[in-house]
Amino acid sequence: MKDLLTLLNCDKDTINLILNTAIQMRRIVMSDSKKAPQLIGKTVVGMFEQDCLESNTLDLACKYLSGNYVTSHPTQSWMEVARAFDAMGANLVAVKNQNDSFLDALSKVSNASIVNMGSKLYNPVRVLTILMVLKTKLDGLQNICVGALGNGDVSVMAELDYCLSLYGSNLVWYLPKDDISTPKKGVVLNNLQNVFSGADAILDLGLAPFAQGERYYGSNFGIQKELLDLARVDAPLIGSRNYFEKRGVAEYLNNTVNTEYSCYIAICMALLYIKTKNL
């Protein structure tokens, strides 16, 4: 498959290929010598509205694999800019744009591979990062239960629910009863304790603008310690460093934020290699 717009059309073998390649790439990230030859002669273009961590990560991923990276913040037609880079010989164009129709249209006319770095409906690179963190922290993806809360980064939920189901695993999401606007994916419960009880990992999606923390976390200050205590012992917390207890906000010992960063760049490196090696 030339492009990666969503994981919903990927089978388990494809996801395993990406994750297993990323595990090898992470060894480069964690090593003292961060220079490998996989992207020699390859050029990657990143298209983003503004400078951001995703763009900087792609730049670093290309450097680690000896490739070339160009970033663009288009002020004119995104389609024309993308097609121009394609005509100039770019091997891969990574795009962060809320317009999923634009990504679909670009995929149909581009010779370069197209990778979705985050759109309104999908965020495959972030979802693959979550899967890699789970695989690293839980020694596999089979038969696990991931509890989720928050209404912020909801673009990951459809793909994450689909991917976990391929491994016989479940995604359980807390949303308050009166939330009728958030698209619901996975098993949705309106009881926080039931979401945390026995969960193998917890995913914090953050809050959408103007959302009240107390509605989604049971506290305005974030996830409560007594809820984390309901999950399995040493359950990893993805998406947040902190929890709230009576004495105030504290850092959760088993948060995975730093691991997420190293896994994110490893996933980027894996995708750059897989998507360009036959071009």
Image: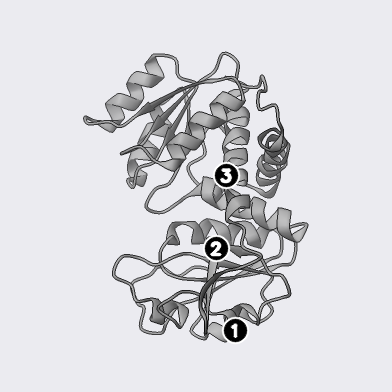
In the image, what residue type sits under mark 1? Glu
Q: Spatial distance from mark 1 to mark 3, Cα to Cα?
A: 30 Å
Q: Quadrant of the N terminus?
A: top right
Crowding at mark 2 (Cα within 10 Å: few <14, some 14-19, many 20+): some
From the viewer's perspective, tell me whether residue 83 is left or right of residue 233. Answer: left
In the image, what residue type sits under mark 3? Tyr
From the viewer's perspective, tell me whether residue 106 is left or right of residue 199. Answer: left
- Kindly identify the residue that appears in the image at 33 percent across and 39 percent down: 102
In the image, what residue type sits under mark 2? Arg
Q: In the orientation shown, which residue stands out farthest toward the front?
A: 247
Which disc is residue 264 wearing?
3
Q: Is mark 2 on a helix, strand or loop?
A: loop
User: Upstream in the sequence, badge 2 or badge 3?
Assistant: 2
Which disc is residue 241 wearing?
2
Crowding at mark 3 (Cα within 10 Å: few <14, some 14-19, many 20+): many
Which disc is residue 72 wearing?
none
Percent position (x, y) of residue 24? 73, 36
